[in-house]
Image (tube, grey):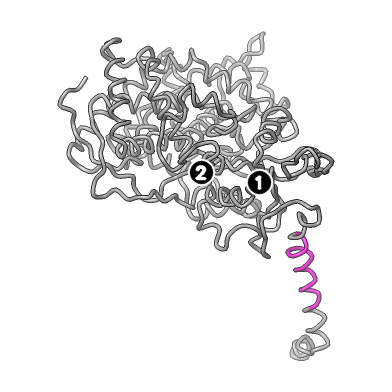
Amino acid sequence: MGSQGENLRRPEVIVPLLFILVGVFWWLVVKPLSYWKKRGVPSIPAAPLTGSMPLLFWRKYIGDVFASMYAKLEGKKYGGFHNLSKPSILIRDLDIIKDILETNSNNFHDNDFELPATTGEEYGQNLSFLTDGSWNALKPNLTEIYSAGNIKNAMPFILEVCETLEDCVSTKIEMAMELKEMGECYTTDVISSIVFGTRGDSLLNPCGKFRRMGCKIAGMSASRSLAMKIPLLLKIIPCLCSSRKAVDYFRSVVKEAVHIREEEKVQRPDFLHVLLELQKQGKLKVSEEQTSDPSKTDSEGNTTELDNEALNTIATQALTFFINGYYATSNLISFSLFELAYNGDIQSRARAEVTKALEHHGSMSQDALSQLHYLDLILKETIRKYPPSPFLARKASKKYYLPSAEYENEEEKSKEGIWLEEGSSVVVPVLGIHQDPKYYPNPETYNPDNFSEKTASQRNSYTFLGFGKGSRACNSMQLSLLLAKVAIASLLAKYDFSPCEKTSLPITMDPSYLITMAQGGLWVKVSSLKKKY
């Protein structure tokens, strides 16, 4: 053994070994960094290991990273960058974005985030992560869940949670209140009611089990954050994205709720009921190969008895509701109220509209909410400034032609474009577009009139991508907007929000998340209105 160790330390052994290691490093890490330059594509400079991403990129808010690239590529239709060593392309031109997300969406059907098959089913059967075949099988049926009729049926349960929300806020009068937790507890309670058929009571008990398990599912630990930003880690350690304890808890909640309904012959018109019906009709399959147990179906193929696997499928889809709607809704509420606290004139205008609608309709209802047009503008402006997903990522399913990256004049129309290879990663920088002064003058200023009918009609519709576009647009958009709208309207009718000593500006975004999430609290002061509706 001693002589072997000495042989390995000899120069004639060490030098060739070093050359081999350097060669491998150059081939795998350095050589790919010239990919875009060789193809004549404008690009963001890249360094070995981190690529075009900033050093310690996991400590940077991903929205700012892509917005910075967007700004550096000013005057170009698109530009290349390297996500670590992987060549990717960032699209700036709105016509190309429309072509990718809508016109030729079949070429970019899948999100560029592939989960290994062993990842927890709460993510593995989520529409956001499903690929072509499975997505096509499930998408139409899940879209059916968010129909206007189903949302209307759930309205009484939503209003019931709003009453609890109002009561909880009343305990904070003339005190500082943290909006993020409030929004998360409200959203948790609504989802627990309309999707899981139970009372979460998170507003009354923020440390309760339903909320704690919900945080395990939707929260962002350090390991999960790193895995989301470096997907290769998920292939090595798939459990980084899953919490078995939380999944088992929510399965038990669903099974108990279904058992009670079947035993007591109760039919509650909520989303759990819709999921039950879809499962009985075999519409929650993620592939055509999945079939129901023939011994448990009627002559028309509908399931007459739900076995354990069927209940697990329902629980899995209930969990996707939670994951997809939790932060989208809670952040929309908290960011909106925070901005209203700093923009008293906007808050007063919104409150006057709410008061008028309530006086006309007598109480909060869908009819009253339909009259709150200015509040609609507020929600859109919040989404512009704080988009739920600050970027969209797609993967090319086949070769795709991109025209020249230059905005050509009449004399330069002969410039050739490039062909994107199958599997190429394409990024749409949502936050960068939303902050572009060409589309939104003074983009840092909170201005709901950016979305007035007259102003919005003068802009390309692809300047607003808060919920995505095309076939992959967010399924639950209308429900999230409704939940936020009814919560904000209910609170504006009784309370005033203003800055307090705990308020911190500017808002810093949490780099742990791939979504837009404030770091630390969003604090405001709550005051009771002298005249309440």
Name the outermost residue toward the left: 530
Task: Give the class, few, some or many, for how many residues have Cα within 10 Å of label 1's Cα (few <14, many ≥20).
Answer: few
Q: Quadrant of residue 301?
A: top right
Depth check: give the residue in front, 112 or 290.
Answer: 112
Q: What secondary structure do most residues of the magenta stretch adopt?
A: helix
Q: Of the residues shown, which amino acid type is indicated by label 1?
A: Gly
Side of 108 relative to 183 (left or right): right
Q: Of the residues shown, which amino acid type is indicated by label 2?
A: Ile
Q: Is residue 511 above or below residue 252?
A: below
Residue placed at 26% from the left, 13% from the top? 359
Q: Quadrant of residue 457?
A: top right
| SS label for mark 2 | loop
Q: Magenta residues, as a range?
A: 19-32
Mark 1 or mark 2, earlier in chain: 1
Contact (CB < 8 A) between labels 1 and 2? no
State the residue position of label 1: 75
Residue placed at 82% from the left, 43% from the top? 415
